[in-house]
Amino acid sequence: MGHGDRSQKLKILFVFFEHIDGRPKAEFPVRRVVLWEPDDEVAALLKTDWERVRTKIRRGLAHELSESDGRIMGPCTKGADSKHLRAQPFSETKARSRAFALKQAFTKTLYRPPARTEQVLKTSDAPDLEDRLLARFSRFVGRTVASVADELGVPESTAKSYTASVARRAMGASSVRSRIKEFDDTGLTLRITRVNSDLLPYEAISFRAFDYFELLDESWEDSALLSEVEYMLLVPLHAPNRTTSQRESTFGDPVFWRPTSHELELIAREWEVYRLEIREGRANRLSPASNTTAIHVRPHGRDGQDRVQAPGEPDARKQSFWLNKPYIQKVLAEARKD
């Protein structure tokens, strides 16, 4: 990337096409063509991502790089598998081959038609995205959801997403339905987790329900789970007990979580185990959370009648990946120490 030299500014022609099973690639329909070059704000984010990776390499930590070492551009792995290693310049430890790639979440923003978004703060207002969001939210920490909602004009609701709607308003969204541009651009996912005094969540954190067949076609680097887990904003919601209502619970300090390379390797291993079980026709008999450390799979449908087809299971439960409760507690506890 050029350092302020406009002549070296990045320019990419994106051709978005639809993959259709059973048809040759030459017949895939082109859905959108975009000639893209970053504006100053995105260019600044790209430079920050590049410098973060470069700093790690100069410290001899290329072997600890992961896809989460970047907001909109990350160092993705190259090569057939994790055994494909190469020498790094400042350490004797070999590291996986990597190449920069734009994040899936950011690339999707280039494909989607312009949507209503709400920009939280301009880049010039603060040096770092996370600092800006934390500064915006800081005055609400320690307050009940009810008091924050009343101040920001969020109507009372019994929906599970109610607290998340209040948190989004607190971070700058103009309404409960408007988008936050920084979240879209960086793939940052907001998760509210109700916790007890020891930071142990009352419930695991769920992700989007998956299609069994699409899951088996994914590689880890291009997986839906990686795109959701690699950059998260966890907002603990302190509640004395499980029955405490959302409105009576209080906001804790938000935690930005980027899994380390070791954490991502753990999650990827457990993800592969579930894919193997599904491939073997065990969609309705997957390993429970007690058998894993970071993630597990369990139903995520409207009710018990929400069924889909899976390999070897014509009547499988609709399911999703979930972050395990003790694992979330560990992430929150380690952030508190920092």
Image (cartoon, rainbow, N blue to C red):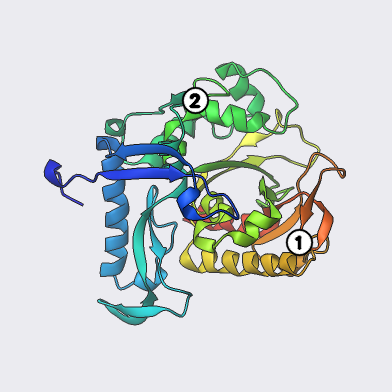
Residue behind mark 2: 173
Q: What is the number of the mark on residue 311? A: 1
Query: Is residue 156 depicted above or below 196 in this figure?
Result: above
Look at 47% across and 23% down and name the residue there.
116
Please state which amino acid type lies under the numbered disc 1: Pro
Question: Callout 2: few (<14), some (14-19), or many (20+) C-alpha neighbours within 10 Å?
Answer: many
What kind of element bears circle 2?
loop
Residue occupying image coordinates x 75% and y 46%: 300
Callout 1: 10 Å neighbours few (<14), some, many (20+)?
some
Up the image or down, 297 lies above or below 276; here it is above
- Is residue 104 shown left or right of residue 128? right
Of the two numbered discs 2 and 1 on the same chain, state the one appearing first in sequence.
2
Closest to the observer, 138 or 323: 323
Tell me whether the residue at label 2 lies in contact with that at label 1, contact meaning CB atoms closer than 8 angstroms. no
Which percent across, then down, holds residue 164? 61, 33
Q: Is residue 137 or residue 300 the one in the foreground?
A: 300
- Could you give the CA–CA distance between mark 2 and mark 1, rounded to whole angstroms? 41 Å
Q: Nearer the viewer, residue 137 or 220?
A: 220
- Position of residue 133 in the picture relative to residue 39 (left or right): right
Three-letter amino acid code at disc 2?
Answer: Ala
Q: Quadrant of residue 333?
A: bottom right
Which quadrant holds residue 326? bottom right
Q: Position of residue 297 (x, y in %)?
A: 73, 57
Residue 31 in view (yes/no): yes
Q: Nearer the viewer, mark 2 or mark 1?
A: 1
Q: Is residue 297 left or right of residue 16?
A: right
Secondary structure beneath label 1: loop
| In the image: residue 265, left or right of residue 273 | left
In the rendered image, residue 160, in percent from the top left (x then y), is placed at 72, 33
Measured as percent of width and height from the top left, residue 144 is found at 64, 29
